[in-house]
Amino acid sequence: MEVAPVSSAPLDGVAAAAGLADLPPLRMRLAARGIDATTLLCLPAVAAVLALFLYPFVYGLILSFEPKVGGLFANYAKFFGDPFLYDTIATTLRLAVPVTILNLVLAVPIAMRVRLMRRQRLLTTILVLPVTLGTVLVAEGLLNYLGPQGWFNRTLVWLGVIATPLKLTNNYWGVFASLLITGFPFTFLLTLSYVTGIDPALEQAAAVHGAGARRRFTSVVLPLILPGLAITFCLSFVQAFAVFPSAVLLGAPAGATRVISIAAYQAAFEEYDYAMASAIAMIMGAVQLAIVAAVLGLRALVYRGPVGGTKG
């Protein structure tokens, strides 16, 4: 007597159901892949970056290759073929690089001193006060203070130090002073955060072994904050390179302080050549990216890792 085979389909269904029951919930599986509620909170920020940065950048890049006259690269050829245009790169670098370096040179010793003071918050507030004034107010203040009839020149003339007022505005030095004042608070705050992140026990251990203040700084503190200073340099440089109000109000927009941002503004709003303005903006971004990449490349020779802890 033959026995009919028993179908395995019901058993397979039961096993599959049991397997699904053993699986963790979808929420846990997504969290294991790094997708959780915290990650989802970043989606609005990602959307804002795409809307406010990526789309305008791509649009400007495409627009730069659509010149009014000529071929695909006509705008770029026009820029690099006209000394009045491409000299703005060197002019901007002559302002941005020295200002950034001087801000770092000033910020490091001041941050080293402030971190040891009892009223650190009060002093920090005083030092970062210029950033709340804005570039235009700082420029107006410098015009009233350093101008030909400003307090500084009038005081020097009254004391007999000089016979005629010094020309400290509407030139390179007026823009330099403005960038220095407005850029220092930003550089100082970043430097202070790196300096205060160093464990005091490291300096104390060096002092126990006979290292003086200068030796402790050069052998202990500086190597630890150097990677952080590279990041500070990049951020401060990008801020200074984008100079526009200071160059217009305190400089000579058609002469010694005709920076690249002025060239882009004139192309867009005086010549109404938005394609050329976009090309200049792309060149401006490329120069900044090249400097930042060079600095970060040098930083990688010193330290490879996250910018945090005692590494500054």
Image: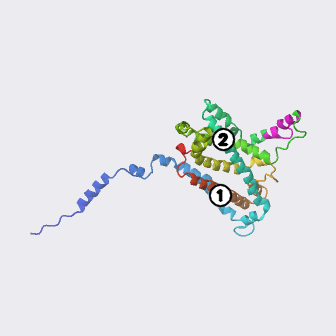
Q: Which residue is mark 2?
A: 107
Q: Is residue 243 left or right of residue 308?
A: right
Determine which quarter of the picture holds residue 209: top right
Quarter-of-image position of residue 291: bottom right
Position of 163 compared to 305: left or right? right
> Magenta span has 85?
no
For this rendering, which residue is in front, 160 or 36? Answer: 160
144 magenta-colored: yes
Q: Residue furthest top?
A: 118
The residue under label 1 is 290
Q: Nearer the viewer, residue 95 or 196?
A: 196
Above or below 32: residue 190: above
Identify which residue is drawn at 68% across, 48% down.
239
Residue type, label 1 = Ala
Residue at the extreme right of the image, as rendered: 163
- x and y percent of residue 215 in the render? 60, 41
Place of residue 123 in the rendered image (x, y in percent of width and height, measured from the top left): 65, 33
Say few, some or many: other residues with alpha carbon within 10 Å of mark 1 (under 14 / 14 to 19 / 20 or more): few
User: Which quadrant of the figure contains the C terminus?
Assistant: top right
Q: Amino acid at mark 2?
A: Ala
Q: Earlier in the sequence, mark 1 or mark 2?
A: 2
Q: Secondary structure at mark 2?
A: helix
What crowding class fits label 2: few (fewer than 14 Cα within 10 Å), some (14-19), or many (20 or more)?
many
Q: Which residues are magenta?
A: 142-158
Q: Position of residue 289 (x, y in %)?
A: 64, 56
Q: Residue at x 71, y 47 (%)?
A: 99
